[in-house]
Amino acid sequence: MGWSSQDLGTNMLVDLQTFEKTSWKAGEEPDHTRIFLTKSQAAVLANYLLKASGSLTPVKRKGFLQSLFD
């Protein structure tokens, strides 16, 4: 079970491998789901998954000009 991705310039292809519990125990091959996304869509999905899992989202760094005014 796992996932992989391919960089296609402005897009990407995400390949997910999943099992149902019974097929995992029976040693069957995983199901493959391929998702074609823009990189913007991939970033939104990544942010959603981070929030849904309860993980912290990456902290946005301050820009150069903003750091001068703080």
Image: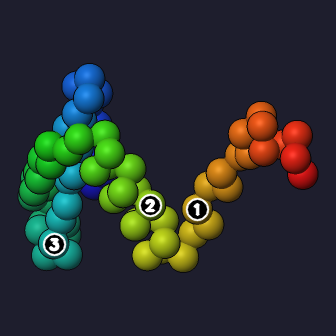
Q: Name the residue under label 3.
A: 20
Q: Is residue 28 above or below residue 63?
A: below
Residue at 40%, 66% in the rendered image: 49
Residue type, numbered disc 3: Glu
Q: In this view, does 68 lie above or below 9?
A: below
SS state under label 1: loop
Q: How is the model colour-coded?
A: rainbow
Name the N-terminal-most of marks 2 and 1: 2
Label 1, residues with CA under 10 Å away: few <14, some 14-19, many ≥20: few
**Which quarter of the picture shows residue 15?**
top left
SS state under label 2: helix
Q: Mark 1 points at which residue?
A: 57
Q: Do the residues labelled 2 and 1 touch (CB within 8 Å)?
A: yes
User: Which of 44/46 is in front?
Assistant: 44
Name the N-terminal-most of marks 1 and 3: 3
Q: Where is residue 17 in the image (x, y as percent from the top left)?
A: 20, 53
